[in-house]
Image: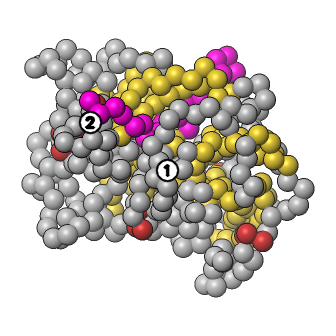
Amino acid sequence: MRQYGSPSHPHFTRTPLALAVTGGMAFAGLAHADVQVTNEEVASGVESEEATLTVTQVVGGIEHPWAVAWLPDERMLITARPGNLYLVDGDEVTEVGNLPKIDTDEDQKPAPEGGNQGGLLDVVVHPDYDDNGWIYFTYSSPGDDDSVMGDDEYGTGTALARARLSDDGSELTDLETIYAQVPRTAPGRHYGSRIVFPGDGSVMFSIGDRGIRYPSQDLTDPGGSIIRLHEDGGAFEGNPFIEAEPGNLRPEIFSYGHRNNQGLALHPETGELWAIDHGPSGGGEQLYVAEAGSNHGWPQVSFGREYDTDEFIGIGEVAPGVKPPVHVWEDTLAPSGLTFYTGDEFPGWQGNLFIGALYAERLHRVVLDGETIAHEEILLENELGRIRDVRQGPDGMLYVLTDESDGGLYRIEPEA
């Protein structure tokens, strides 16, 4: 049984979280018996540079959770990669039904242990949810044989869908898949895929290179791109490659040359789209600002190496026409989750950028000076596990999800 306290940190408890579940939990719908609201403090007196922190596990027992979002009434939606969507309402957990067909692997191991990286991925509530009720989510979509590139008989692609919740929260209604990546490909990895709403009537989301690399530089293929659509589907007017020569470029592509973006965030003051991308072996994780038509270089421009041969990938670290990153991490983070902090609970964190790290098992706090990193602090290193998502909650607290077979949602708050 995993101990969530760390002997190296005197303020972490040594109590296994599996034994720290409070009684009286109510479950509705199809909720899995092991997914529970716990509200159990797991750490106190955690010192950071700007605050002393308390960490509380809010929900536990989730198999490889991927994303969390809040409805206006502060109910939570949590996705789990094996294809589960949970609605958390107070102490009640409901598994939401009527999802689309999702390609998942029965063996949902994290990436270092092998296994499929697909499943149910990001979830975001529409900014005008009170008026329209839309919830957007991404997932790995299985495709028909004739949508698969190459000789493979079966492939998958990143898809974006939207739906509404039924009155009792037990299922999705009005389900629409508004985009599905074509061609489908066989590798079960590098799906992306975060979602943002810029506020101009569009929705944007990322698609990874799908483990093939070279679609990232092919503007006739959406792999390795950030996609911008109308909120109800269709390429957004003003996308950079609409009617561009030679006339067959994908009109939905906003930017390209990405490897596997699992973090997108809009700058709260400038509206710029910030993104963080997984590097290959040996690091090379990149933070950058994506713009309409910008090429971020992968795989011709790279800061990492081949897994098998340790050779450098690409033609170098710079190239004409390639937008350079804001920052490159030389060590391996496996970044996932990106958010700007704008709340009032941590005054010293105002405007800071937070990054989750899977492989490095930590949270990064980044202080920006324009498009330069002025300072960086490492938080919760090797304490909670693989951090998959990081979000600011409506209460002004910071929340993280851990990508574990017994993963959870954790709240980070200033110590009283």
Find residue 153 and report its horizontal and vertical position in percent. Answer: 27, 41
Numbered disc in front, either 1 or 2: 2
Q: Foreground residue, 331 or 309?
A: 309
Magenta residue check for 126: yes
The local secondary structure at tag 1 comes to strand
Give residue 250's mark: none
Find the residue positioned furthest to the bottom.
7
**Which residue shows up at 16% across the image and 59% down it?**
313
Q: Amino acid at mark 1?
A: Gly
**Which residue shows up at 35% across the image and 18% down it?**
235
Question: Is residue 132 at least partly visible in the picture?
Answer: yes
Find residue 181 and report its horizontal and vertical position in percent. Answer: 34, 32
**Which residue shows up at 43% across the image and 48% down it?**
118
For the C terminus, the image quarter is: bottom right
For the N terminus, the image quarter is: bottom right
Give residue 337's mark: 1
Give residue 148's mark: 2
